[in-house]
Amino acid sequence: MSCAELIHQLGQKLNISDLSLTEDNTCGVLFDDDDVLFENVNGNLFIVAEIGRVEEDERNKYFAIFMDANHLGHGTAYGSIGYDEQRDIFTLTRIVSEDIVYEKFEEQLVVFLKTLRYWKKYLQDGEVSESTTETENSSLSMLSGLS
C-alpha cells in the first residue's frame, strides 16, 4: 500500500473522512493528547511525535537512558528516540515502508502510541508503573479508542 493509501485507510478507520497527505506529504492526527505527524519521504512513512522536554541539568541523564533504549530498538519498539536541538525536545520516530499491509501498519501505530506514552510517563514521573507497560490487543477498537 502506498503511504497515501495507508493514511486514507487510517482516516476511514478513525472516521476522519478527509484525512490525507498534504502537498508537502505530511498530515497530523491527534490521538487523545498525543499529536502524531505522518510524513511520506521517498515511499517511507515517518511517524513522529514529541516525547517532551527536560531541564538542561538533567539532559545528559536522559541522553544515556534514551541511547540505551535505542540500542537494537529494545526500548523504542524498533523506533528511535531523538533530540531536536532547535525545538529543545525529545521525539520518537518510527519508519514504515509503503509495502506494508494496512493491518500491520495499524499494529505498528498502536505499538508506537504505547511506546510514546511510556516515555512521556517516564519523563513526567521518572519511573513507569507496570500498568503503563502492559501489552494490549492492537485491534481497531484500541486504535479507535485513541483517536
Image (spheres, grey):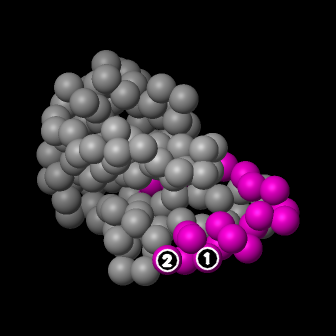
Image-based side of 101 in relation to 29, left or right: left
- Looking at this view, name the residue that lies furthest to the right: 57
Name which quarter of the figure residue 134 lies in: top left
How many residues crowd around disc 2 within 10 Å: few (fewer than 14), some, or many (20 or more)? Answer: some
Name which quarter of the figure residue 20 lies in: top left
Which label is found at residue 64? 1
Image-based side of 1 in relation to 47, left or right: left
Could you tell me which secondary element the residue under label 1 belongs to? Answer: helix
Q: For the N terminus, give its image quadrant.
A: bottom left
Residue at coordinates 19% horizontally, 31% vertically from top-left? 140
Residue on which disc 2 sits: 68
Instruction: Pick whichever, 16 or 72, lies toward us.
Output: 72
Place of residue 24 in the rendered image (x, y in percent of width and height, measured from the top left): 57, 51
Q: Which residues are magenta?
A: 46-68
Type of residue at label 1?
Ala
Instruction: Pick whichever, 78 or 29, lies toward us.
Output: 78
Residue at coordinates 19% horizontally, 59% vertically from top-left? 100
Place of residue 139 in the rendered image (x, y in percent of width and height, measured from the top left): 16, 35
Residue at coordinates 40% horizontally, 66% vertically from top-left? 75
Image-based side of 143 in relation to 125, left or right: left
Mark yes or no: residue 84 visible. Answer: yes
